Image: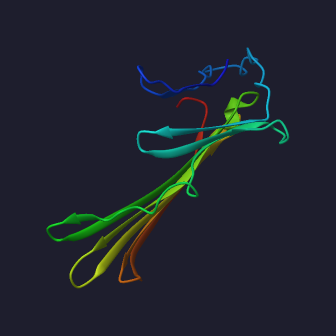
Amino acid sequence: MSTSLYLGAEVSSRLLLPTVPVAGPVPPLASRSLPGPSRENLTANNGPWRILRTIYDDPKPTIIEESAETSPPPEPEVRPWGSETRLTLRRFQVQDDHPELDSSTGHLEVKVQLPARELTWHSEWDVHSDRMNFYYLFKRELRENGKLIRERKWQGTIPRDHQ
């Protein structure tokens, strides 16, 4: 059982996660972590990404994240009714030795500038797991000229018993 990340040019990029059996214990891993430390930079079709692998942390994670330091500030898209700016930061953490501990976190912000007001939608998420459960947290809020108009939060635990 292993987790694989494919970064393709001819074939689309994908993350292959292990299959967990419906009943019984999780089977042992078929491979060990790759040696490190090594750092590799790449550019995805939707922005700059950074891949980090280290042997110094325990457990030894591979972190895939959009690098805000190398991203230029987003340019507003001009529309007939105003302008729109989007900022997305995402982080995926995977571990060869413990695929059950993989996680995804991030946030999205959309600002719409209208003639008389500014609307901002902000979303945050955290999805992670352990051997027994998946955990999710999603928060969303809407602001008008900096004042909070609406907010909502979803949080829960999903058991890994496939029910």
Q: Tell me what residue is drawn at x 35 percent, y 83 percent.
A: 145
Q: Give the residue at x 68% y 30%.
A: 99
- On the rendered structure, is 71 left or right of 86? right
Residue extending farthest top: 30
Judged left or right of residue 35, residue 140 is left
> Is residue 163 something one can see in this rendering?
yes
Q: Position of residue 10 (x, y in %)?
A: 41, 20
Q: Nearer the viewer, residue 90 or 125?
A: 90
* Residue 35, picture quadrant: top right
| As drawn, 139 above or below 127 | below
Q: Residue at x 68, y 33 (%)?
A: 100
Relative image position of residue 33 (x, y in whole percent): 77, 25
Q: Quadrant of the N terminus?
A: top right
Side (left or right) of 14 relative to 30: left
In the rendered view, tell whether residue 62 sits above or below residue 5: below
Query: In this view of the protein, can residue 156 be seen by the observer?
Result: no
Q: Is residue 92 left or right of residue 56?
A: left
**Image vertical order of residue 161 relative to residue 133, above or below:** above
What is the x, y in percent for residue 62? Answer: 69, 37
Q: Which quadrant would residue 57 be assigned to in this image?
A: top right
